[in-house]
Image: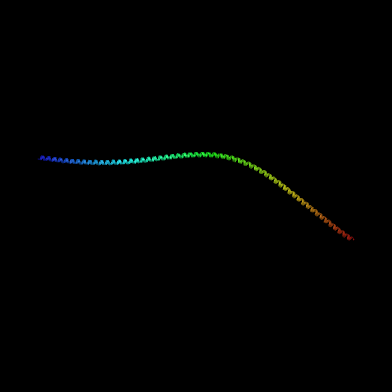
Amino acid sequence: MHDIYSKTVVIYHFRFEIIIIIIIIIIIIIIIIIIIIIIIIIIIIIIIIIIIIIIIIIIIIIIIIIIIIIIIIIIIIIIIIIIIIIIIIIIIIIIIIIIIIIIIIIIIIIIIIIIIIIIIIIIIIIIIIIIIIIIIIIIIIIIIIIIIIIIIIIIIIIIIIIIIIIIIIIIIIIIIIIIIIIIIIIIIIIIIIIIIIIIIMIIMVMMIGIIR
């Protein structure tokens, strides 16, 4: 009986241990499973986060690339437009410069021709004017000389006439004076003679009276 009891106790004890072991194993398994699940969840979350980050980075990169491409395209277009505008401006400037040069050359040629013609005309006019002036001066000199000669002649004639007139007047005056003087002298002589005669006659009469 004791042996049976001992065996039974051993068996029960063994069963208890087995149960404990099983429970421990189950707990360990559950813990392992939970840890695995947690790890898996963490890994999944990390993967999702990484994927999201990668997607965001890719999107940002794509957006940046698109923006860069657009900017590059815009810059290229602007550069092309600027180059075209510059080329057009340069062509226009060159054309304008050529036209201006041609116009300037034509104007210079025309001006030179006009200047030459004007110079020739001026020279001719100057020569003609000089000739005319010389002729006029000669004519004026001749006229002046003639006038001077005429004036001198007239003055001489007038002077001669005046001198002659003065001489004649003087002669006439002298003659008149002489005549007057002669007449006066004659009258005086006559008067003296008459007086003498009268005196003589008076004396004679007196003498005759005395004598008588």
Q: Residue furthest left?
A: 1
Image color mode:
rainbow
Q: Position of residue 98 (x, y in %)?
A: 49, 38
In the image: residue 164, left or right of residue 63: right
Q: Position of residue 7 (x, y in %)?
A: 12, 39
Which quarter shows the C terminus? Answer: bottom right
In the image: residue 94, left or right of residue 47: right
In the image: residue 55, left or right of residue 194: left
Q: Position of residue 99 (x, y in %)?
A: 50, 39
Q: Nearer the viewer, residue 141 or 113?
A: 113
Q: Residue furthest right?
A: 212
Which quarter shows the N terminus? Answer: top left
In the image: residue 136, left or right of residue 25: right
Residue 142 figure quarter = top right
Q: How many marks do you count on the picture?
A: 0
Q: Nearer the viewer, residue 55 or 14?
A: 55
Q: In the rendered view, tell whether residue 62 sits above or below residue 210.
A: above
Q: Position of residue 55 (x, y in %)?
A: 32, 41
